[in-house]
Amino acid sequence: MVGKADEIQALLQSYRGYLRTLAAARIAPRLRGKLDPSDIVQQSMLQAFQAWDQCRGTSDGERLAWLRQIVIRNVLHALRDFRRQKRDIGRECSLEEAIEASSQRLEHWLIAEQSTPSGPVRQAEEILEIARALDELPSFQREAIVMFYWQGCSLAEIGEIMGRSGPAVAGLLHRGLKRLRERLAEPE
């Protein structure tokens, strides 16, 4: 049993970057001081580990869909807790739809014509690799990329949130994308 538990933990760990990217993309920057995407992911991974026998997925894509639902539920619960505490989150959009849209934007970023049955498997592997590479970036670069590409914020909006000028944000994006390209070009 210990071998199987280690195998499940290793598999879940390989999805951590992807799940963190999804959670971070849906937590408004103004809530980041109170709600850390890593905490949501940690809770989600613990729940997934405990309920692993309920996962019917056999491929990365199917398991990611199952894990995405767990993350959505945990983000919704965390935001509900803020509402109970009378915090101002009334401007938040439907989180389930927003996370799904973020996930789709990430997936569409990779999609070319899927001409073979192995296409979805390759796509899931590429999504995981991008998420891992994104997770390895310095936090300011990662946040700027997530806000710009997945949340659709403008350079001015990102600059206001991060307390930086537009050109500084553009530099963060440029350096972050350069590092992502370098990381993704490296052979495993």
Image: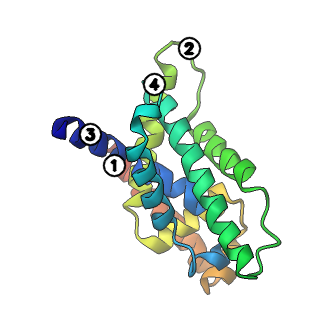
Q: Earlier in the sequence, mark 4 or mark 1?
A: 1
Q: CA distance from mark 2 to mark 3?
A: 24 Å
Q: Earlier in the sequence, mark 2 or mark 4?
A: 2
Q: Nearer the viewer, mark 2 or mark 1?
A: 1
Q: Amino acid at mark 1?
A: Gln
Up-down: is 69 above or below 88? Answer: above
In the rendered image, which quarter is residue 58 located in?
Answer: top left
Furthest residue toward top: 116
Helix, strand or loop status at disc 1: helix
Residue position marked by numbered label 4 in the rendering: 121
Q: Nearer the viewer, mark 3 or mark 4?
A: 4
Residue position marked by numbered label 2 in the rendering: 115
Q: Position of residue 131 (x, y in %)?
A: 45, 50
Q: Residues within 10 Å of mark 2 (few under 14, many from 20)?
A: few
Q: Are marks 1 and 3 in contact (CB under 8 Å)?
A: no
Residue position marked by numbered label 3 in the rendering: 187
Residue position marked by numbered label 1 in the rendering: 13
Q: Residues within 10 Å of mark 3 (few under 14, many from 20)?
A: few
Q: Are marks 3 and 4 in contact (CB under 8 Å)?
A: no
Q: Amino acid at mark 2?
A: Ser
